[in-house]
Image (cartoon, rainbow, N blue to C red):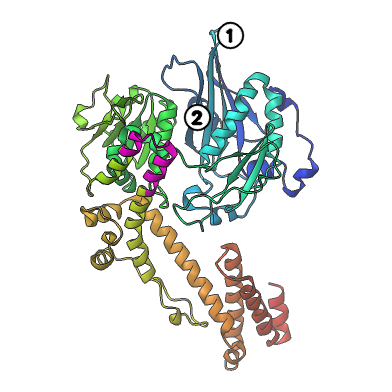
Amino acid sequence: MDALSRAGPRPRRAAAAASPLPWGRFAAWIDCVCVVTFDLELGQAMELVYPHDFRLTEKEKTSICYLSFPDSYSGGLGDTQFSFRLRQAGGSRSSPFQDDGRYNREAPVTLQREAAHYFGYVYFRQVKDSSMRRGYFQKSLVLVSRLPYVNLFQCLLQLIAPEYFDKLEPCLEAVCNEIDQWPPPVPGQTLNLPVMGVVIQVRIPSRVDKPGSSPVKQCNQENLLPAPLVLPSVHELDLFRCFQPVLIHIQMLWELMLLGEPMVVMAPSPTMSSEMVLALTSCLAPLRYCCDFRPYFTIHDSEFKEYTTRTQAPPNIVVGVTNPFFIKTLQHWPHILRVGEPRMSGDLPKQVKVKKLAKLKTLDTKPGIYTSYKTFLHKDKTLIKRLLKGIQRKRPSEVQSALLRRHLLELTQSFIIPLEHYMASLMPLQRAITPWKNPPQIRPFCQEDFMKSLEHAGPQLTCVLKGDWLGLYRRFFKSPNFDGWFRQRHREMTQKLEALHLEAICEADIVAWMKDKSEVEIVDLVLKLREKLVRARCQHLPVKEETLQRVGLYIDTIIGSLPEDLQTVLHHP
């Protein structure tokens, strides 16, 4: 039993009183911290989970152990950082962090807290150590969280992991106690997060932020000593660096992501594989990538058989791997991106070529995109020229990344805006919403009607790219990304209709309506209004609090008009 497990429950501190449960503030950011070590007899083994009462299933522990070490032999010594994502096993479980879903309602859809998956952020150290039987010290510190804040958590690991490897458990306990003092992540707020004598300053993105806008200037610096470590973004990667070997194919990769196509990323290291997968899935923002993705995947993963079987088509997933064994087991997948160590070719990083899948050799596969996919849209040569000019002028990587992100954002917006406009036209007119009838239904989405609307309101209005936009939309309709987008928009529109119906009830003359109604009809109205109120509060409908209060007063007025025996029954539901 490790030192922290022996310590028993830690005492509650006064500062944590604002959180209803122990570790509530800590759990707002991180579910648990794991330490994985190499055991000569067991291989990778879980040395520590903290807080000690956090329950991971045996399946999750095994997965975390394998995903926390490089999968293929790496002779490299030193420190490595990468990330992974794994499916939660054993059903849903309660968390000390309770926010009634507020964070997910206010955060951008691309940054919502995961419900069924964990992210793992890894700091792996491999150094020669003659005191170890194997001659090497090999250990990983892993932050397990449901938040996709790759920048923040990797920055946090850079601060705490080197210190932990020197001082071990007491250091980790102190850090976790500090994190348990942090304010929760509230979208739209700039937060100061103290840890180990450093203050990390971050802004949590909000759903109401304008896509592509630069982050709000950080504030509250004048009172902070030492000066804070300001992170420009909690989640955005250096896209230009990640996409260096595939810049001339960015159009194709964007389309493959949009259509939710199965793709394997083969890279020399977990760092490169995880960064490439996260960069690919982020290039649809502000559209949510609704398929599965595994930034780093090993042959020991419980889903290995599911992904390598040839009896069915590969699933809609982007999977990052490093073990050459996958070249053989995944060669039936339709799109394989093989990247090597970054190499320069003149001014431009060496670009991979598109190759036929038949050329994928089991051994010594050269970098390339192995696919037979033909893009629907033409390549944007202006973007490539601008990026190339930036390389020649030694433009900073963050500026190049901003150019690339702006291009991908405008491309996604050009594609999605016609869909948004058509979807809005399916909403019933406000005058059709009357207080004493159920709200009218949203009209069904008709693909052919949408296609006709593109003639006068298509992406050509906002995007210079030519190509087969109609063909791209038809393929998109079959993808999980369309299904995810449509369900979310339909849910939002249904809630808006409910909200408008409640407002119509508030503006109605309820006393006049009751005059010629039977007791049965009036009781039925009371029950329906109560149900609407409960739903409005549970689903957090976009309704003003005063509207809900007025509906409550209406219910009291109606009950007051009924005979006393009925009033007694209705007052005690």
Residue type indicated by callout 1: Met
Residue type indicated by callout 2: Ser
User: In this figure, what is the number of numbered marks?
Assistant: 2
Q: Residue at x 47, y 76 (%)?
A: 439
Could you tell me residue 321's position as x and y percent? Answer: 38, 28
Could you tell me residue 11's position as x and y percent? Answer: 79, 36
Q: Is residue 42 visible?
A: no
Q: Is residue 565 visible?
A: yes
Which quadrant would residue 339 be assigned to in this image? top left
How much space separates mark 2 and mark 1, taking CA atoms?
25 Å
Q: Which residue is mark 2?
A: 63
Q: Is residue 286 above or below residue 562?
A: above
Q: Is residue 416 above or below residue 241?
A: below
Q: Which residue is mark 1?
A: 132
- Category of crowding for the residue at label 2, using alpha-carbon neighbours closer than 10 angstroms: few (below 14), some (14–19), many (at least 20): some
Q: Which mark is residue 34?
A: none
Secondary element under disc 1, as helix, strand or loop, is loop
Q: Is residue 82 left or right of residue 242?
A: right
Could you tell me residue 166's position as x and y percent? Answer: 65, 19
Magenta stretch: give its range.
389-406
Residue 446 magenta-highlighted: no
